[in-house]
Amino acid sequence: MDLFEYQAKELFAEYGVPVPKDKVANTADEAREIATAFAGDGIPQVVVKAQVKTGGRGKAGGVKLADSPADAFDKAQRIIGMDIKGHTVHRVLIAEATDIKSEYYLSFLLDRANRTFLSICSVEGGVEIEEVAHTNPDAIARIPIDPLTGVDHAKALEIVRAGRIPAEAEEGAAVLAERLWAMFTDEDATLAEVNPVVLTPDGKVLALDGKVTIDDNAAFRQEHDRFADIASTDPIEARAKEKHLNYVKLEGEVGIIGNGAGLVMSTLDVVAYAGEEFGGVRPANFLDIGGGASAEVMANGLEIVLSDPAVTSVFVNVFGGITACDAVANGIVSAVALLAERGEAVNRPIVVRLDGNKAAEGRQILRDAALAIVEQVDTMDGAAKRAAELASAAKGA
Amino acid sequence: MTVAIFLTGQSRILVQGITGSEGRKHGARMLAAGSKVVGGTNPKKAGQTISLNDTEVPVFGTVSETIAATGADVSVIFVPPAFTKGAVIEAIDAEIPLAIVITEGIPVHDTAEFWAYAKSKGNKTRIVGPNCPGLASPGKSNAGIIPADITSEGRIGLVSKSGTLTYQMMYELRDIGFSTAVGIGGDPIIGTTHIDALAAFQADPETEAIVMIGEIGGDAEERAAAFISENVTKPVVGYVAGFTAPEGKTMGHAGAIISGSAGTAQAKKEALEKAGVRVGKTPSETAALIRQVITGR
């Protein structure tokens, strides 16, 4: 899960990573109140920053300086509701305006290729690091971090020196790095990026912006539910999550249910290829029901997929490995009955492809059940084609 | 002479977490497939036995004790995510040659730690996974959760990030058969990579051709492509899943995510093709390509 800047900064503050004074506002009125309170504390100028999980906010006009509480209200009013690269701004961060002498870059991240962690540090901050990598690659230092020893003060100094951060900011940047690493490990982050790290004219080093990604697999030992972005979550994805289903909403018409992440990804691709022949219909979702595929899970899956009004046909693609296809077929039959009992309209065609362990038995069960909406095709490619064809026909109708 | 890779008919398997529901279920399946499951661990049930398909399998307190008593040389790990790091470190400390981590949902910081630990101990333990289906050398041994009865012994070597796509491929090519199928797992950090398996298949006289299955996320496939150009003379056929996956969304596997423009299926396909690997558009086209390679000569 990617965090908003204000959430990242909340974590920074918890771990003593120095940040400018700030507070999040959901409305322009709140922005004015916060700016008023800040002015009372001797902070006359604030920055109003759009909270969206994408880069390039400044260029899009989502970050503005405000000279007074009234100005903060105006700027917040303009920014809230703005669309930045497809992300709607629902709130703004009101932050103390900081005088900047220099800007640097610092991050910790997962290094998949080397199966370890990496720190990236550069004396050139405030622009996207990819851009620096392009224009001035020598200005970027990449320092591998041993997960067993981590980042102590000496290692932190090694990082900032490698990034050629000047002597006047060295100690402050090293302290920041050390604390940022503590946050990175204790919070199970896979990315903690500060861009820019700033040096103020009075010699302080601060994290002016922050980007953090946390590992969803660590949810069992973290308290990260508070960061969930319910407002921006697709409602179908949210309901799928409640039912412990691995569902991702896409933009197409063919609902997809399968077992195993790789097979489901592959199913999306095969449906998209098949759809090229049928008016460009595309997969409507990713849904992996896993190895178990009980009738209940199948029913929940079908319900979720069919709750997407864009879906005009469904493709159930199951390879029976450990799960036998007869169990899956029984699951489909019970699922359709269960949905009817729940009063759900199961009125769109379902193309089923069963293969592997006990495929013949599974196919027979579906034939015997003779459900009007269920059609079987024996191969994955053939079934994808049929599902695309049905989706296209229904769409045209 | 090597027979199959990593896992042979002589492999003696222990199960960490043998008394849990997954450990019991798959322990029994492995035995039924003809694997030598010689013991398992559960510190609380040390000294007891557990009945798997009417075979009484001894339970020990630690991996070291199991090895000492049974000569086990492979561990299959089924313990829950919160305890997996400890289990893998125990396996590394016991210097077992092969540890297969089936568990899904392990925090990546834990994996990074046990990988670093294995490295600090001189990599005496080959780690496969986590979040993988394990290894199957049909007709010889089966260590993990790959169904044993969907394929046959043969000359294709298979390495894959995905479990079900592995099964699908093994099933479609069951008449030709496999030397070994290696499920390397779908997590961002894994112990054994495509490259490790490719190197082993290249060296294995029983493997005639290789199928390599990848998916979106990271650059493991690109690195494997570079390795193939330099080191693999046997024919390799590839498949990559996730062409339609959107940017920034995790597609089931923790590692299956396109970040910015990095980790796309298209880039992986292009890298593989540049290395002379024929890449199938669908799983069945991929199966057809390997069939051509094997039967066409």
Image (spheres, rainbow, N blue to C red):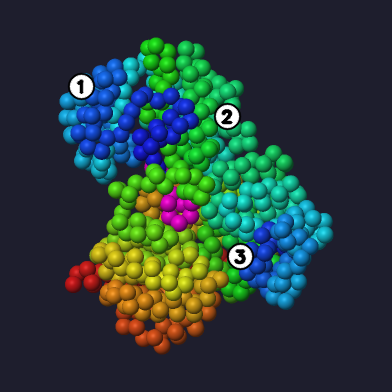
Furthest toward the right, the residue is B69
| Horizontal side of residue B153 vs B265, given as left or right | right
Q: Which residue is mark 1?
A: A68
Chain letter of mark 2 equals: A
Nearer the observer, A115 or A73: A73
Nearer the observer, A17 or B262: A17
Task: Say which amino acid is labelled 1.
Answer: Ser
Indicate which disc residue B22 carries. 3
Sort mark 2 into few (<14), some (14-19) or many (20+) by Cα contacts within 10 Å.
Answer: many
Residue pictured at 32% horizontal, 62% vertical = A284
**Helix, strand or loop at mark 2:** loop
Tell us which disc is closer to us: 2 or 1.
1
The image quarter containing residue A282 is bottom left
Instruction: Give residue A212's position: percent from left, percent from top.
Output: 43, 37
Q: Quadrant location of the N terminus of chain A?
A: top left
Whether residue B232 appears in this view of the structure is no
- Whole-Å distance between the Cαs marked 3 and 2? 38 Å
Q: Are labels 2 and 1 assigned to the same chain?
A: yes
Indicate which disc residue A151 carries. 2
Comes first in the chain, label 2 or label 1? 1
Residue pictured at 79% horizontal, 62% vertical = B47
Residue pictured at 44% horizontal, 34% vertical = A11
Nearer the observer, A243 or A37: A37
Task: Say which amino acid is labelled 3.
Answer: Glu
Q: Which residues are magenta?
A: B250-260
| Horizontal side of residue A5 vs B274, given as left or right | left
Instruction: Give residue A118's position: percent from left, percent from top.
Output: 53, 34
